[in-house]
């Protein structure tokens, strides 16, 4: 049976001003840049899904770095821009549990959440440099542990044509999403890659737990997908649903250590 083809739409959920080296580890320190916070709305095969939910009140996080959000960039407003309501969302996939990817989980008590089991455990006691990123609740009386599926295996199938792959390095339990689309296999990268330079230099995003794992995760995404939606990519547009960036081919430097996942994994194709 042919796999379902899904539509993926980029939802802008705010902006964070960061040092560029936070996007490109060791590259351009001291250069300030504004990065969008993207969620990804996925629709097809009778389901509506959301990958990452964005941050809550911007002023709660301004003590770390500047945040801002336009009126149409709250989660309810962004969903309204594609004709969705909060109650329409069946599934939420969190790439990881940092505040800018998961703080709005509590707005979605009717959804089923998918989080890496490693990330769930790591979030209870992260390393000191990442502790502030987890300083918010992702459960309450309405969204409890029972709302979460803790994913323990690689290539976990959420639906036919949608799989989760483990891409650690930015956080210990980071996962990315492979989606079958009209453009080919789209990787919703989360923070395993934030800008195209992560692939082309290559260098991972900063703020990581393991540079070695992060570099391996970049090559993993490169091998397994045709196009990519990076959740802090400044090149995307609000409500973009096609013409996502083509995944760069393996460069000489990256290719020397790359391992072919296409030969060993069952892909979406």
Image (tube, grey):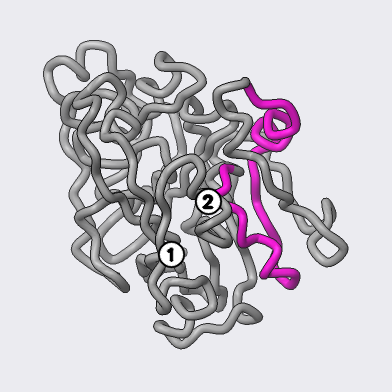
Between residues 220 and 188, which one lies in front from this camera angle?
A: 188
On screen, 148 above or below 152? below
Name of the residue lying farthest toward the front = 63
Q: Which mark is residue 13?
A: 1
Residue 115 on the magenta segment: yes
Question: How many numbered circles does the render carry?
Answer: 2
User: In the rendered image, which quarter is residue 46 located in?
Assistant: bottom right
Residue at the image position 61 percent from the left and 55 percent from the top: 103
Residue at the image position 52 percent from the left and 39 percent from the top: 175
Secondary structure category for the residue under label 1: strand
Disc with the residue nearer the chain's start (1 vs 2): 1
On screen, 252 above or below 167? above
Residue 65 on the magenta segment: no
Q: CA distance from mark 1 to mark 2?
A: 10 Å
Residue at the image position 60 percent from the left and 35 percent from the top: 132
The span picked out in magenta is 98-127
Secondary structure category for the residue under label 2: helix
Residue at the image position 39 percent from the left and 58 percent from the top: 38
Image position of 7 (left or right of 209)? left
Q: Which mark is residue 101?
A: 2
């Amino acid at each position: 049976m042919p796999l379902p083809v899904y539509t993926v739409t980029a939802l802008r959920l705010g902006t964070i001003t960061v040092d560029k080296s936070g996007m490109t580890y060791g590259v351009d320190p001291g250069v300030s840049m504004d990065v969008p916070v993207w969620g990804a709305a996925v629709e097809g095969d009778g389901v509506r899904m959301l990958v990452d939910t964005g941050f809550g009140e911007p002023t709660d996080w301004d003590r770390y770095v500047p945040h801002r959000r336009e009126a149409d960039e709250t989660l309810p407003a962004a969903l309204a821009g594609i004709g969705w309501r909060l109650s329409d969302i069946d599934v939420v996939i969190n790439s990881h549990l940092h505040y800018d990817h998961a703080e709005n989980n509590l707005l979605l008590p009717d959804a089923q959440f998918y989080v890496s089991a490693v990330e769930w455990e790591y979030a209870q006691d992260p390393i000191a440099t990442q502790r502030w990123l987890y300083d918010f609740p992702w459960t309450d009386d309405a969204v409890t542990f029972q709302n979460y599926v803790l994913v323990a295996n690689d290539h976990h199938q959420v639906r036919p044509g949608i799989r989760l792959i483990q891409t650690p390095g930015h956080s210990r339990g980071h996962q990315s999403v492979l989606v079958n689309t009209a453009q080919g296999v789209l990787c919703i990268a989360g923070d395993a890659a934030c800008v195209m330079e992560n692939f082309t230099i290559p260098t991972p995003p900063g703020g990581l737990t393991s540079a070695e794992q992060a570099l391996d995760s970049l090559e993993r995404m490169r091998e397994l997908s045709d196009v990519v939606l990076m959740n802090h990519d400044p090149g995307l547009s609000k409500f973009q649903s096609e013409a996502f960036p083509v995944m760069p081919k393996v460069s000489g430097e990256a290719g020397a250590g790359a391992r072919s996942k296409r030969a060993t994994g069952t892909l979406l194709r």
